[in-house]
Amino acid sequence: NAGVTQTPKFRILKIGQSMTLQCTQDMNHNYMYWYRQDPGMGLKLIYYSVGAGITDKGEVPNGYNVSRSTTEDFPLRLELAAPSQTSVYFCASSYSVRGYNEQFFGPGTRLTVL
Amino acid sequence: AQTVTQSQPEMSVQEAETVTLSCTYDTSESDYYLFWYKQPPSRQMILVIRQEAYKQQNATENRFSVNFQKAAKSFSLKISDSQLGDAAMYFCAYRSARGAQKLVFGQGTRLTINP
């Protein structure tokens, strides 16, 4: 069981470039999330998904897009990268059963936009 | 919208002593969960302890315990017998019991352990 995996671990982008951050989970979780963590701050929700084909915006969605074609994968797309998107990005997943369900986090992707 | 506030950007404690990290939150809901996460330099988010709002009893996990005051909307973390490995960023987080289980995080407290 690999849990939640993210690629790449690090990336430097130039302003205006695009990229996709990959996230995969092997726990058959319905719920998946993308958070960003700015230096010295807590995590903020970008987008989330409650199942394949269903996505919704979180607190800070501007400049990002997501898709969820399978239960396992939840890629995050950055179009026209800007310095304000320099951050650490975390993917997470959890079960959708009612009640307490632990949210499992990936190791994060450190993105720098110059 | 719910908010979570951690008013202590940094805390330090002597090894083997006890430290308490503060957290307050704002919500109009009555059913929710509260969490403390630890983030060491590796960046990995590690769940330390959780509390269900409908439970009056404070949660305890080995050296970690919480003081949950629902009316005051306060949720502090006590670390007893502090160890060097406890040094990390600590985040308080809120999750509604309804909906998509989204987490709302505080700004974090950096904990330093002095040998």
Image: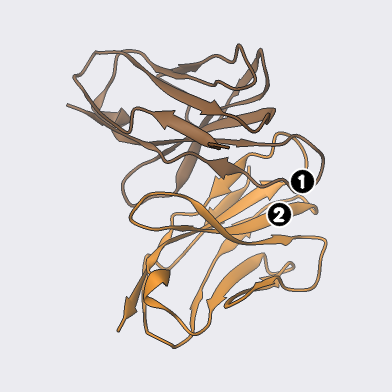
Q: Secondary structure at mark 1?
A: loop
The chain to which mark 2 is attached is: B
* Disc 2 crowd, CA 10 A, few/some/many (<14, 14-19, 20+): many
What residue is shown with label 2? B33
Residue A109 at x, y percent in the picture: 36, 34
Pointers 2 and 1 in contact (C-beta within 8 Å)? yes
Looking at the rendered image, the quarter that the C terminus of chain A falls into is: top left
Amino acid on which the number 2 mark rests in the picture: Tyr
* Residue A32 in sight here: yes
Q: Could you tell me which residue is drawn at 35 percent across and 52 percent down?
A: B42
* Quadrant of res B113: bottom left
Along the viewing direction, whichever of A14 and B71 lies nearer the viewer: A14
Asked if residue A43 is positioned above or below residue B48 in the image, the reply reads above
Rendered hue of chain B is orange
What residue is shown with label 1? B97
Q: How is the image coloured?
A: by chain
Q: Could you tell me which residue is drawn at 33 percent across and 52 percent down?
A: A40
Asked if residue B100 is positioned above or below residue A65 in the image, the reply reads below
